[in-house]
Amino acid sequence: LSKLNSSNKGTIRLVKLREKLFSFLKKNPDLKRVDNDFLKLFKNWFNSGFLILKKIDWSTQALILEKVIEYEAVHEINSWKDLRERLEPHDRLCFSFFHPSMQDEPLIFVVVALMDKVPEKIDDVLSKDRKILIRGSETTAVFYSISNCQIGLKGISFGDFLIKQVANAIRKDYPNIKEFVTLSPVPGFSKWLKSIDTNFFNKMYNKLSTNKIQKSEVILNESILKYFFISKRLDYLPNDPVARFHIGNGAILERINFLSDTSEKGLEQSLGFMVNYLYNLEEVEINHEKYVVDKKINTSKSLEKEFIKLNIEIG
């Protein structure tokens, strides 16, 4: 594998080869040894010291822009016009990591909205009728989409490096920015709720999809808090994969937003919930250590109070 890597376009070919290998692993478990070799080498080849952070904007070459459309995994980009609205305005930013041996292939990218508040709904970010801020009035950088681009690099973590570097780049160019937050999906919530009570999930889904929302928030609030704070995993880490990613990177769970994404995808995967994770750049290392040691979600005081009330009721 090392010799192949030195050939012309060898790195990207090996990444694609590992992607193909995944389709054989289930029926051929012995090939896991080969995958382990790939993973060991890739962790060395793609360490942070080799990665190049680049800003992507509307003037970036079309080959890369096409891949931003292709790889967007959180909020689908339906056209070049959609892409332009996410890249061209001065209050919309996109950054990606590249590897020197894969200059035409983004590894991971993050899309950022500069705002004057922490958004509660995805429409606050993506609406075509949104108010474009006057430059200098931005106070909050919102990471609203983070997409891994190469399936063959599964198991290689880039997100922690990316978020910190992007935050520092933004702070340098936009000194008014005081808060760094996400508006993140909750992709595992519906699946988790179905595993506990399928009938309850179906009832809630039908109510929300037909706008019969009365009392739904109170009922679902208890379920979403249990999902985040009571782990059933063997490693005791949070149930939600996005929570594991951001909390593991040193963020805190700041706020849970009801009916934040009412699209079909949003209702199906999370009954419309989205959350804000807050990155305090001066405390991310401390928060990361607390998470590693305690294996608990670091959270805002307001959410902690809600959970304590819930915990008393459960008890």
Image (cartoon, rainbow, N blue to C red):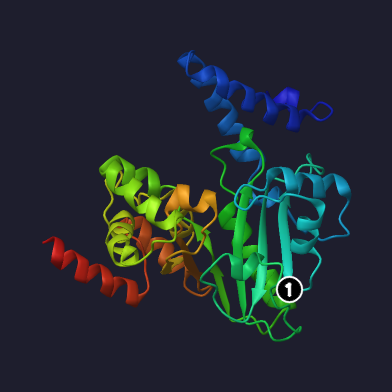
- With 314 as the anchor, is 119 left or right in this view? right
Image spot of residue 213 (x, y percent): 38, 64
Can you say which quadrant of the picture contains the N terminus?
Answer: top right
**Secondary structure under the numbered disc 1 in the rendered image:** loop
Image spot of residue 157 (x, y percent): 56, 47
Residue 12 picture quarter: top right
Label 1 neighbourhood size at 10 Å, few (<14), some (14-19), many (20+)? some
Inspect this view and state whether residue 99 appears. Answer: no
- With 131 as the anchor, is 44 left or right in this view? left
Can you say which quadrant of the picture contains the C terminus?
Answer: bottom left
Count of number-bearing discs: 1
User: Quick check: 131 above or below 84?
Assistant: below
- Which of the two residues, 3 or 9, is positioned nearer the viewer here? 9
Name the residue located 30 percent from the left edge and 40 percent from the top edge: 195
Name the residue located 28 percent from the left edge and 50 percent from the top edge: 231
Please, what is the three-letter code of the amino acid marked with disc 1? Asp
